[in-house]
Image (spheres, rainbow, N blue to C red):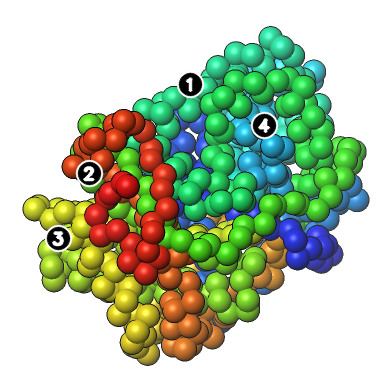
Amino acid sequence: MMQVMRAVSATALAGALAFGPVWTAAAETTTRPDAAAKAKTEAASQSDGVAGTPADDKKVEERITEFTLDNGLQVVVLPDHRAPVVTQMVYYHVGAADEAPGESGIAHFLEHLMFKGTKANPEGAFSKAVADIGGQENAFTTDDYTGYYQQVPASELKMVMEFEADRMANLVLTDEVVAPERNVILEERRMRVDNDPGAQLQEAVGAALFQNSPYGIPVIGWRGEMEQLSRDDAIAFYDKYYTPNNATLLVAGDVTAEEVRRLAEETYGKVARRADPGDRERALEPEPLAARTVTLSDPKVTQPSMQRVYLVPSETTAEPGEAEALDVLSDILGGGTTSRLYRSLVVDKAIAAGTGTYYGGTALKEGQFVVYGMPRGDASLADIETAIDDEIAKIRETGVTEAELERAKNRVRKNMIYLRDSQTAMARRVGAALSTGRTLRDVETWPDRIEAVTVEAVNAAARKYLEPKRSVTGYLTPQAPAAASAAPDAGGDAARESGADAAAPAAAPSRS
Ligand SMILES: [Zn+2]
């Protein structure tokens, strides 16, 4: 039986905040050592959307199956018989933005603690079982969801389902395991944020962009609050959110829907519904009134860069057609070597080592539109920003062409083919969508909605959303600019300030 069961409330939303290539995807933290690569993959899959020709869509509709167990667990099956391998993913519909005030980092902390074992399967047993059969595993936390996955030989699917179902209900957390793991996440913060100027700036940009929304709080947490996270906090979070009716199981690979249904009922079907997390609350982000700039200067910076992040709707909050228009706009402005920014900054003016854009539309609430650039040769950050401003002004004043629109749609189609071709990429895309207030059908119809985007819609999105007052501009530099060097706290500290003139954001890193 195939049916769509999860009611999507209009207030439900969320989004994994992912950022363009200049800035590592700090919003997503992962447990395993290959974290950075995984985070980038996630960011890419979120930005790509799902594209494809109408003919392909039919195939997808036949092959992706969705059903719900009696305990409320949503199950999605994505068959792919090219190799005898399966990937199991469980997405809990809870992330850092669901944390209670003062408990930043608890979602990610619990992700770590989920590896501490149960009565039946002590710490390490699950990971060892996966490793023993040559499998891979990972876990990740974002603002809106937390995921766990394993890739194993198809014959071992039931085994990993048993383990994952067991820790959905029977996690054992003692002070002996919780305290040392808190040191692990503090060390993770030190290595990935406190020692990385790019990540520090990223955090400051996020905090400046979101003035009220929890999306402004880093997924890994603020250090002072992380230090206070307790075993009781972790257990309370687990009991409230790690219940089958708050999760989606995705199985991709060499399986049939019938097999997955049978195995899911034998394993997850035995897990009782433990709580009802209710509607997902997010503090309202007000309409922004002033352009803001953030500067971080640190001697460790070898490549200066600038980034502009605009507050825009997500795929979940956008008016019909707007998210699709923003996706196409991003492609025309900064998607690859035929984009306007690349041709202007890298090819014609030869002032940039790299430039591009990114639409982060996978979120329960607000989305982000990111533009970035890195100078090369004698060019300064100011040169880069001026050139980017010129291109944005041009696109807002005179709009895009039909030819550009067609090229962009072609690229989105190609991205879709890539997504379909990857056993895990499509599952991740579906898992993220179902965890941020959207449906399988939304994912499946994305290509048709991209095809329907018009020049007028793209132009309207550019004029409405690429407004300076909606943005924060972040500068990463090797040393403080002259105007800043006299400030008492110049140096490694992230500075946060509001630009005085929304219509004319600072052309160079500056502090007042
Ligand atoms: Zn971690």
Upstream in sequence: badge 4 or badge 2: 4
Considering the numbered disc 2 on the image, is that residue within a helix, a strand or a loop? helix
Q: Decide if residue 65 is in sight here.
A: no
Q: Is mark 3 within 8 Å of ligand 1?
A: no
- Name the outermost residue toward the top: 176
For marks 4 and 2, give the CA distance.
37 Å
For the residues carrying marks 2 and 1, which lies nearer the camera in this image?
2
SS assignment at label 3: loop
Q: CA distance from mark 1 to mark 3?
A: 38 Å
Q: Is residue 486 above or below residue 415?
A: above
Residue 162 on image: x %, y %: 76, 34
133 or 233, which is in the foreground? 233
At mark 4, the secondary structure is loop
User: To which residue does mark 3 refer?
Assistant: 351
First reached walking from the N terminus: tag 1 or tag 4: 4
- Amino acid type, callout 4: Glu
Amino acid marked by disc 3: Ile
Disc 4 to disc 3: CB gap under 8 Å: no
Does residue 404 appear to the left or right of 409 in the view shown?
A: left
Q: First in sequence, mark 2 or 1: give its number.
A: 1
Q: Which residue is mark 1?
A: 187
Residue indicated by mark 4: 103
Which residue is disc 2 drawn over? Answer: 483
Q: Are marks 2 and 3 in contact (CB under 8 Å)?
A: no
In three-dimensional space, the C-alpha distance between marks 2 and 1, rounded to whole angstroms, equals: 34 Å
In-image side of 113 versus 37 (left or right): right
Single out the mark in the foreground, 4 or 2.
Answer: 2
Q: Amino acid at mark 1?
A: Glu
